[in-house]
Image (tube, helix red, strand yellow):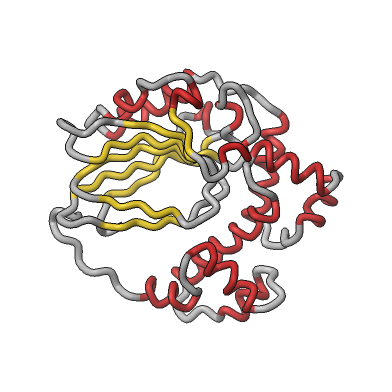
Amino acid sequence: MARVHFRRRPAAEPLRRWVEHYWLIDWDLEEPYVSQVVPHPCVNLVFERRGPAQVAVASGLVAGVATDLFTTKLADSGRVCGVQFRPGGFRPFLSPPRPLTALRGRQLTLREAFGDGGAPARVLGPDAEDRRVAALDAFLLSLSPRTDPAAEQAMALADRIREDRSVLRVERLAADEGVSVRTLQRLFATYVGVSPKWAILRYRVHEAMERATAQPGTDWARLAGELGYSDQAHLVRDFTAAVGVTPTAYARAVETPPRPASAAEA
């Protein structure tokens, strides 16, 4: 984050039942920078301009849940305005509605998703950040998201997976909800885009990353037990598959102080 200006902003109150937050990035780099992100089980709506405002073309896309490490190269200058939906919160905006598994690992143009191709210029154009946030609000509200009890259930279950560390098995979650495992799997396939098992594992990996960042010298064997893994080897396997490096390599990287940013990078 020393190389880009990153911040989060809340959506308008009527949208917060579906939207996790907006995320805004601006950069002006002296040399290219490769950014890597471990995705959450959620859909993102992304408006971006790569290059100077006078010459670069604004574009927009819907990014389904990515199951692999997301890598992008930032160069020169640019701007991104993104919407991170809550897991299960995007489908009420999609027209026509379709199972979210159709978007897994894929991207849709704005016309494919909403039938509107003019939004990028409206969102990215204003210099004032508050006006860009207002433009995001206006665009999402114009889509008239539909109330959907199944979407509400999917969002509540995803929240529980994220916040309740005791949720380790799909069978337990299904039993607590009074539904079959198959019913739970269909709900997640339709509204989240990944299986409940995948969501559980991914949130545990994110928690392991947060622990490593906040607590130098993490005891990985102990953390594996706290996260519900049968042994450290299983945590290492899942962590490495999601992040691209082993837990110890990641811990060494986050414990290394970042180099000072130049004026252009700040």
The picture quadrant where one finds residue 97 is top right
Residue 235 at what x, y percent from top left?
Answer: 61, 72
Horizontal side of 77 relative to 105 (left or right) equals left
Residue 229 at what x, y percent from top left?
Answer: 68, 71
Q: Quadrant of the C terminus?
A: bottom left
**Is residue 84 shown above or below 199?**
above
Q: Quadrant of the N terminus?
A: bottom left
**Is residue 174 shown above or below 55?**
below
Q: Residue at x 70, y 69 (%)?
A: 228
Q: Residue at x 67, y 62 (%)?
A: 165
Residue 156 at what x, y percent from top left?
Answer: 68, 42
Residue 185 at what x, y percent from top left?
Answer: 75, 45
Instruction: Specify whether residue 226 is in view.
Output: yes
Instruction: Specify whether residue 214 is in view.
Output: no
Q: How many numbered marks, from 0 up?
A: 0
Q: Residue at x 81, y 56 (%)?
A: 172
**Is residue 109 shown above or below 174?**
above
Q: Residue at x 47, y 57 (%)?
A: 69
Horizontal side of 238 relative to 60 (left or right) equals right
Horizontal side of 5 relative to 9 (left or right) equals left
Horizontal side of 77 relative to 184 (left or right) equals left
